[in-house]
Amino acid sequence: MRLLVVGGSGFTGGYVLREAARRGHEVLALARSPAAARTVAAHGAQPLAGDLDDACRLDEAFAAARCEALVCLASLGYGHGPGIVAAAEEAGIGRAVFVSTTAVTTTLHPPARQVRLAAEEQIRSCGLDWTILRPTMIYGADGDRNLSRLLRLLSRSPVLPVPATGECLHQPVHVADVAAAVLAAVQRPAAIGSLYNVAGPEPVSFSELLRICARAVGSRTRLVPVPLTPLVLLARGYEVLSRHPRIRPEQLRRLAEDKAFAIDDAIRDLGYAPRPFGEGIGDEARMLGLAP
């Protein structure tokens, strides 16, 4: 199948492009810069010049691609969803898979939440044969936003303060399992018009997640629970002072919410079979050179 991938130069994008090439798909990937073009080419895709902030250029790129299906991995939280949908419809691309996030289910109100929900609603009402996937926290290799940092901290820190949210549930998903779900959704007719949670096989408590990560790197770090409120206040100050904060208050506050999701529909329709968290995080620790 001839695929057009948007967001292929990102962390998940690399896995999707490589897996698509391995499965024999012909893949074009939108690239807004020479650096992005080199990245997607290294993953086996043909770079296609285009910019999500330039509607005319985007329409031209989608039309020139002459693809059968669109895979949109770019975040829906920046307001690009309507332009991507319109360009796909204008280009006559019938099939489209969009990757959103389970973060839209939060009871908090970060600005991107409403933007993402509005994008999902537009996708549901468009003329494309759409599928929406909502991954949970993605991990699996250097460059993931959370667990690679945690593994490094556990491997070198004798004492580590951690938010005191021990029994709240988490269900991280390995990036390779996300890539497999994306490509299965493209080809399976049963997925058309459906939304799927893409998560690990079962939820684990935050305290258990920490223990599993510690075992993966052979850590004897002493974990010191710290009340969440002062950590959130510190993160707010850090956010004000830093031009590119690596952690935001909403991320800490989200730790106090259960993030457990049913994946039965994805198992049934996509043949989804995610790896256990202990196995996946062990593989990541070895990939990072941190395993004992």
Image (spheres, rainbow, N blue to C red):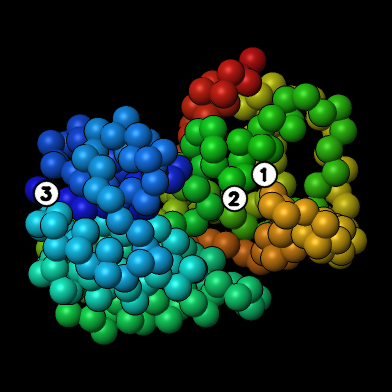
Place residue 90 in its image quadrant: bottom left
Number of the label disc, if any, that sits on residue 208:
1
Q: Is residue 232 at all visible to an observer of this figure?
A: no
Residue at 17%, 51% (x, y): give it. Answer: 3
Compared across the picture, whether 250 is left or right of 22 comes to right
| Image location of residue 78, percent across then percent down | 49, 68
Residue at 32%, 63% (x, y): give it. Answer: 98
Number of the label disc, if any, that sits on residue 204:
2
Task: Classify 34 as above or below 122.
Answer: above
Question: Considering the image in quadrants, where does the C terminus appear?
Answer: top right
**Residue denoted by label 3:** 2
Task: Classify 81 as above or below 52.
Answer: below
Give the residue type that dot 1 points to. Glu
Place residue 86 in its image quadrant: bottom left
Looking at the picture, tell me which residue is in the foreground, 279 or 157.
Answer: 157
| Image location of residue 152, percent across then percent down | 69, 30
| Image location of residue 175, percent across then percent down | 42, 42
Looking at the picture, tell me which residue is in the foreground, 143 or 165.
Answer: 143
Task: Classify 186 as above or below 95.
Answer: above
